[in-house]
Image (tube, helix red, strand yellow):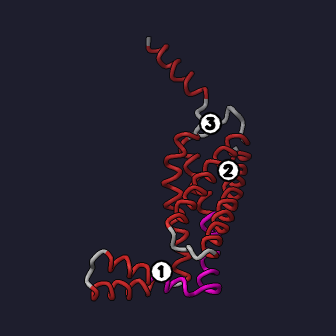
């Protein structure tokens, strides 16, 4: 069991690092091509996270004994922890990007939010108060902390689905259930 815990944390950290690195590269490409606010960036981040969580679960299953059960809860925990480690990397990257490389990203995000609110037909006074409130929260530290929280929630949602397919039941469970049926008869 101790070996299984080491494998669990090893796979979560390794694949979290891979997800974080791939997401940093994708974000850097979108930033360099001036498409930082693109919806495609969101979909690519989702694809990277899904692929990474599935790869982490598959690597864990392959590294453990065939007879060792890989329960749904364990697969769920592995996915969440993998995304947590990726989120820490992305939070540091986000902080550095927004604080030192391009502080103007905050102003661009606020301008985009204002345009969307105007297009939706909101009252200009209401939009102004909304933007002022968002300015209070749009700091590099808050954005980095939000990156971690979003990563955890997102990792949970992805893992809820992927864990269904990645779990491995022990063969003893089936045999035990069949023995119970035979004992009742």
Cα separation, mark 2 vs mark 3, equals 13 Å
Q: Quadrant of the N terminus?
A: top right
Task: From the image, tell me which residue sits under label 3.
Answer: 69
Mark 3 vs mark 1, foreground winner is 1
Is the residue 154 above or below the residue 69 in the image?
below
Position of 124 with respect to 97 (left or right) is: left
Left of 24 or right of it: where is 178?
left
What SS does tag 2 mark?
A: helix
Q: Outermost residue toward the front?
A: 33
Q: Earlier in the sequence, mark 3 or mark 1?
A: 3
Q: Going from the N terminus, do you reach mark 2 or mark 1 first? A: 2
Camera-near label (2 vs 1) is 1
State which region is magenta.
86-110
Q: Nearer the viewer, residue 171 or 116?
A: 116
Looking at the rendered structure, the secondary structure element under dot 3 is loop
Residue 82 painted magenta: no
- Label 2 neighbourhood size at 10 Å, few (<14), some (14-19), many (20+)? many
Q: Position of residue 179 (x, y in %)?
A: 53, 18
Q: Residue at x 55, y 39 (%)?
A: 165
Q: Residue at x 56, y 73 (%)?
A: 35
Q: Main secondary structure of the magenta part?
A: helix
């Amino acid at each position: 069991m101790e070996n299984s815990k080491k494998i669990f944390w090893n796979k979560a950290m390794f694949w979290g690092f891979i997800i974080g690195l791939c997401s940093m590269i994708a974000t850097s490409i979108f930033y360099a091509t001036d498409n930082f606010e693109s919806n495609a960036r969101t979909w690519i981040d989702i694809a990277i996270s899904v692929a990474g969580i599935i790869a982490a679960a598959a690597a864990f299953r392959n590294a453990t004994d065939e007879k060792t059960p890989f329960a749904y809860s364990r697969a769920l925990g592995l996915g969440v922890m993998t995304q947590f480690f990726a989120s820490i990397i992305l939070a540091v990257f986000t902080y550095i990007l927004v604080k030192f490389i391009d502080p103007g990203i905050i102003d661009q995000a606020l301008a985009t939010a204002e345009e969307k609110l105007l297009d939706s037909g909101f009252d200009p006074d209401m939009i102004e108060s909304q933007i002022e409130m968002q300015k209070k929260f749009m700091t590099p530290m808050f954005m980095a902390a939000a990156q971690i929280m979003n990563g955890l929630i997102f990792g949970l949602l992805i893992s809820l689905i992927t864990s269904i397919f990645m779990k491995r039941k022990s063969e003893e469970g089936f045999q035990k259930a069949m023995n119970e049926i035979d004992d009742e008869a």
